[in-house]
């Protein structure tokens, strides 16, 4: 198996991070991998914001958890509470991918590149759509302003990155979902 396929096979959703911030060189390499993603007509309709300010991540986490706690359906809130009570699993770094409206596929490809690049560098990651929550609440405009998000852009996806606590297990691929037409 080649190195790329091994990285894909070993990637898992990391939900437990230690406090170490990955080295700047690693974060820069991951950010470069993000923007090297292919896009329709090479429009590259994304902006990647790398947040390493732990207090800012914690502030967004608290706002997201507050919104979940106030939701009518408590199932998502209870799920996060059972996993430690944090939306972002104490990750020291967050890659936010913002997109132009209607470009979901492109931002998804960017997040896959981020996650695979992190894995290849010995880091854990989890693709996290829940990072959208803080941008929808009462502090949303303040968060957008803090990261400098221009008008016309919207949340696409995020990837939490850091050094994992322990070793995770990749999911078992369901090969019954593969069909060949010959």
Image: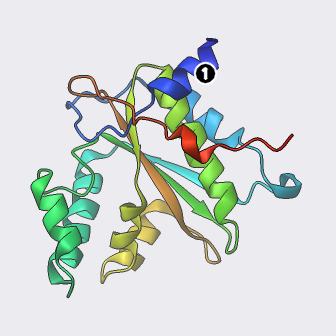
Vertical comparison of 60 with 126: above or below: below
Rate crowding at label 1 as few (under 14), some (14 to 19) or many (20 or more) other CA atoms within 10 Å. few
Residue sitting nearer the eye, 13 or 40: 13
Helix, strand or loop at mark 1: helix
Q: Residue at x 45, y 70 (%)?
A: 145
Q: Residue at x 23, y 77 (%)?
A: 67
109 displayed left or right of 162: right
Looking at the picture, the colour scheme in use is rainbow
Total labels drawn = 1
Residue sitting nearer the eye, 19 or 81: 81
Vertical comparison of 74 with 60: above or below: below
Q: Can the viewer see residue 4?
A: yes
Vertical comparison of 23 with 160: above or below: above
115 displayed left or right of 69: right
x, y percent for residue 78: 13, 67
Q: Residue at x 23, y 69 (%)?
A: 76
Residue sitting nearer the eye, 87 or 61: 87
Q: Would you identify the image quadrant in which residue 86 lies?
A: bottom left
Q: Which residue is mark 1?
A: 5
Q: Can the viewer see residue 28?
A: no
x, y percent for residue 51: 40, 47
x, y percent for residue 46: 66, 57
Q: Would you identify the image quadrant in which residue 36 lies?
A: top right
x, y percent for residue 61: 24, 60
Q: Residue at x 24, y 34 (%)?
A: 17
126 displayed left or right of 179: left
In the picture, the quarter occupied by the N terminus is top right
In the picture, the quarter occupied by the C terminus is top right
């Amino acid at each position: 198996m080649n190195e790329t396929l091994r990285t894909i096979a070993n990637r898992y959703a990391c939900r437990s991070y230690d406090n170490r911030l990955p080295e700047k060189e690693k974060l820069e390499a991951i950010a470069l991998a993000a923007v090297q993603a292919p896009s329709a007509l090479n429009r590259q309709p994304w902006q990647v914001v790398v947040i390493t300010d732990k207090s800012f991540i914690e502030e967004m986490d608290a706002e997201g958890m507050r919104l979940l706690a106030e939701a009518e359906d408590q199932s998502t809130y209870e799920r996060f509470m059972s996993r430690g009570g944090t939306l972002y699993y104490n990750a020291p770094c967050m890659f936010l991918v913002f997109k132009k409206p209607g470009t979901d596929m492109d931002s998804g490809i960017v997040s896959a590149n981020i996650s695979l690049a992190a894995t290849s560098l010995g880091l854990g990651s989890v693709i996290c759509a829940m990072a959208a929550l803080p941008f929808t609440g009462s502090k949303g405009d303040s968060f957008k302003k803090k990261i400098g998000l221009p008008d016309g852009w919207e949340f696409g996806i995020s990837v939490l990155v850091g050094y994992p606590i322990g070793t995770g297990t990749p999911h078992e691929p369901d090969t019954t979902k593969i069909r060949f037409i010959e």
